[in-house]
Image: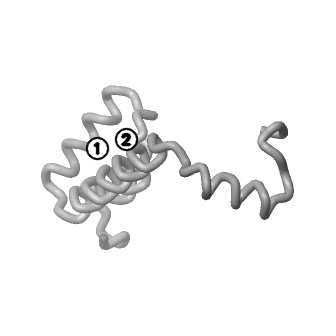
Amino acid sequence: MDIQRDCGCASAFGRIEALVDGQLDAAECAEIRNHCETCESCAGELDVVTSLSQKFRAALSEPCPTEVRDSLFRTLNITADNT
């Protein structure tokens, strides 16, 4: 991205995470998506952020294995009753 010759990239690039997280209104979403249709760099960033976000959400939906949880509690010197 060439900051010296900004064609909307600085604005779009800075809001891509908010777009993916659903934090923008419809007009802002449309503005960024329209920009990404004509900007390969920002479209690539949108793809990366979308993919990572989906992977993080999927990982967080899995319960923590009991042995990992127990090990973490032991390391932190806490009991399950404190959670």
Residue 60 x %, y %: 48, 45
Give the Cα separation between the discs numbered 2 and 1: 8 Å
Residue 49 x %, y %: 35, 55
Q: Above or below — where is 49 with respect to 32?
A: below
- Name which quarter of the figure residue 71 lies in: bottom right
Outermost front residue:
67
For label 2, the crowd category at 10 Å Cα-Cα, with few meaning under 14, some 14 to 19 and many 20 or more, is many
Q: Are marks 2 and 1 in contact (CB under 8 Å)?
A: yes
Residue shown at the point (31%, 35%) measured from the top left: 29
N-terminal of the pair, mark 2 or mark 1, is 2
Label 1 belongs to which residue? 32
**Secondary structure category for the residue under label 2:** helix
Label 2 belongs to which residue? 19
Residue shown at the point (45%, 34%) measured from the top left: 23
Label 1 is placed on what type of residue? Answer: Ile
Label 2 is placed on what type of residue? Answer: Leu
Query: Residue 43: which disc?
Result: none
